[in-house]
Amino acid sequence: MKILLCAATSTEILPTIEYLKQAAVADVSVLITGVGLTAATYSITRDSLRLEPDLLVQAGIAGSLDRSLINGQTVLVRSECLGDLGVIAKEGFQSLSDMGLTGADDFPWNRGKLWHPNHSSLNELNIAWVDAVSVQEITTDATRITYYREVLGAQIESMEGAALHYVGIMEKKPFFQLRAISNDAGERNKKKWRMKEAIAGLNETLQQLLIKLNSK
């Protein structure tokens, strides 16, 4: 199986990059996309077409919108949506579908989200599946956090996740997005972030995932 492993920064998956230099895990290409949806969408599309992998895997850290999630915990993403593509109106934030510019069920969207097509296939790893939102800026505003959590139903936020889901669905490529919680969304005090723990947990689970996929 040919796997394209994507991450926004090398820091997030550095332990796995080093692991792959020594491990007997065949055909894993590493792609550092850069931060944000624009860079990620371009890079993933380019290498998906160029390398023709059998599977796209994205790994990285995320902020939590769900108080039941623990900092350092690793999760798989079931659905993605765009949190800040729209307009701030008098009534509050409105998405493109709220404005009637797109339909909530226009392909590849389904109820305004980009769904993983087979999110039961890795249940044996005992990793929680969550719903995510992708944003262009790290959220610090309490009103936006409430919108993401209560209106969009998002449990975590990242800056690149929707790019993976969009490309995977459009190109009919199997994909998985793996995230580790580094902080609560809106927490500005970085002393309370658990970056090291999140990266350690992320890479431990990522390596287990690659071994499992390689055995298929």
Image (cartoon, helix red, strand yellow):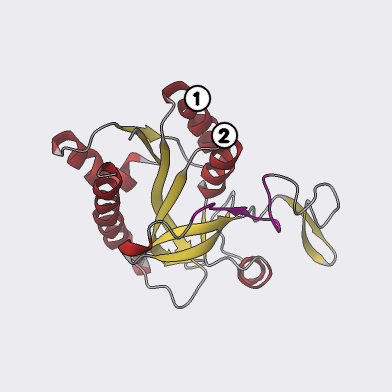
Question: What is the magenta range?
Answer: 108-118
**Residue 213 percent location from the top left of the image:** 30, 46
Question: Magenta region, mostly helix, strand or loop?
Answer: loop
Residue furthest to the front: 216
- How many residues crowd around disc 1 within 10 Å: few (fewer than 14), some, or many (20 or more)? few
Q: Can residue 188 be seen in this view?
A: no
Foreground residue, 59 or 38? 59
Residue linked to disc 1: 49
Going from N to C along the chain, the mark reached first, 2 or 1, is 1
User: Which quadrant, please, contains the N terminus?
Assistant: top left
Number of numbered discs on residues: 2
User: Which quadrant, please, contains the C terminus?
Assistant: top left
Q: Mark 2 touching mark 1, by CB under 8 A?
A: yes
Residue linked to disc 2: 171
Q: Is residue 157 magenta?
A: no
Occupied quadrant, residue 167: top right
Q: Is residue 109 magenta?
A: yes
**Residue 93 percent location from the top left of the image:** 76, 61
Label 1, secondary structure: give it: helix
Horizontal relation, residue 174 to residue 83: left or right? left
